[in-house]
Amino acid sequence: MTDWRTDRIGSALRGENPTVMRRLRAGFAALGDVQFLPGYSVLLVDDPDVQRLSELPKAKRPTFLSDMDVLGEAVERACRRFDPAFRRVNLEILGNTDGFLHAHVWPRFEWEPPDLVRLPVWLYAREHWHDERHALATRHDALRGAIGEELDRLTAAA
């Protein structure tokens, strides 16, 4: 088995990516590696050769975007239940670092530092991204489960 971090989509397709919460229609809903904003999730496309939205077949693009919407709503619902200071989610498709199509779902909270709460998450200090205190761990299992349950409700209703 290869390290799932070096092959996130391949490992998801093989059922070996431990961050994956659910299989959606055009990809995988995964909990983010860092959790300094609890509930941070990522939608991974289900084809490792697709680098950008424009490379998906035209008919599959709306499905990927719909999956992003469903994941965003699931994160919103779960985070609202877990933290009364939940504000909103930010949805982003950036593609600056990883060479495969993916979408970020960032929950945002009132307790964030005042100088960052209304700015892009990417402006958080480097230590937030690499500090073990913020790494995905078993302490996130309850929130992970709640997001998964919301995904199940939302996809069953569709």
Image (tube, rainbow, N blue to C red):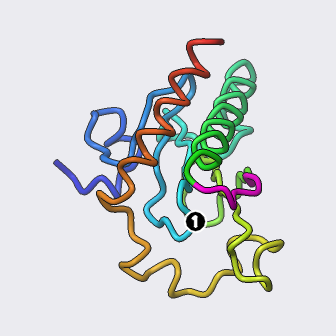
Provide residue 88's location: percent of width, then percent of height: 76, 53
Q: Is residue 18 above or below residue 69?
A: below
- Residue at left 44%, top 73%? 134
Instruction: Identify the amino acid type marked 1.
Output: Leu
- 10 or 137: nearer the eye? 137
* Left or right position of 58 against 25: right
Does the segment drawn in magenta span residue 138? no
Q: Is residue 98 above or below residue 82?
A: below
Q: Main secondary structure of the magenta part?
A: strand
* Left or right position of 93 against 50: right
Q: Which residues are magenta?
A: 83-90
* Left or right position of 73 against 156: right
Provide residue 13's location: percent of width, then percent of height: 35, 33
Provide residue 22's location: percent of width, then percent of height: 44, 31
- Residue at left 69%, top 57%? 86
The residue that disc 1 covers is 37
